Image (cartoon, helix red, strand yellow):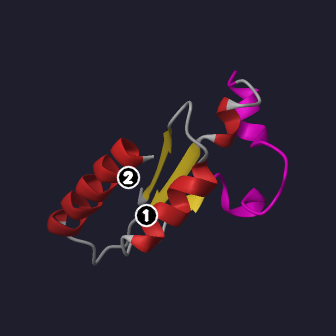
Amino acid sequence: PYILHLNFPGYQSGVLVRMLSDAGFMVAAGSACASETDEPSPAMRAIGFSRKDAFSGLRISFGSQNTIKEAKKLQEALARVLKSY
């Protein structure tokens, strides 16, 4: 219940991860078991995403101690990152 997977077609998730990291947020590209592979997410491919768009997934994990305020800050940072991509 604490994991959110978003897809941003047209954006490379690895780049988004680095940009969000620079903004102080730790997120991941794709699934945990395949985040360091050169292949697109098999799960994303299985549900119909193109090879290119399967590289656009961003995994955000929240813990029980995270607050709405922290989630809002992430939302704002993500908006800035997408705008300046």
Residue 11 horizontal side relative to residue 78, left or right: right
Q: Residues within 10 Å of mark 2 (few under 14, many from 20)?
A: some
Distance of label 2 from label 1 (alpha carbons)? 7 Å
Instruction: Give amino acid for label 1.
Output: Leu
| Direction from residue 58 to residue 40 in the image, left or right | right
Residue 29, how many percent across, how many down? 61, 56
Residue at mark 2: 81
Q: Circle 2 sits in a helix, a strand or a loop, which is it?
A: helix
Please name the residue that numbered disc 1 is placed on.
20
Magenta: main secondary structure equals: loop
Residue under the image location 46 percent in, 71 percent down: 21
- Kindly state the secondary structure of the residue where label 1 is placed: helix
- Would you say 67 lies left or right of 18 here? left
Q: Quadrant of the N terminus?
A: bottom left
Query: x, y percentage for residue 11?
Result: 55, 39
In the image, 42 versus 7, the foreground residue is: 7
Q: What residue is shown at x 23% (from left), y 54% (from top)?
A: 76
**Residue 77 image offset from top left, x and y in percent:** 29, 58
* Residue 60 percent across, percent down from the top left: 46, 58
Extent of the magenta region: 30-49
> Mark 1 and mark 2 in contact (Cβ < 8 Å)?
yes
State the residue lying farthest toward the front: 84
Residue 32 magenta-highlighted: yes
- Report crowding for label 1: few under 14, some 14 to 19, many 20 or more residues within 10 A (C-alpha): many
Q: Amino acid at mark 2?
A: Val
Q: Quadrant of residue 69?
A: bottom left
* Residue at figure coordinates x 70%, y 21% from the top left: 48
In the picture shown, does residue 43 fall above or below 27? above
From the viewer's side, name the closer residue of 19 and 46: 19
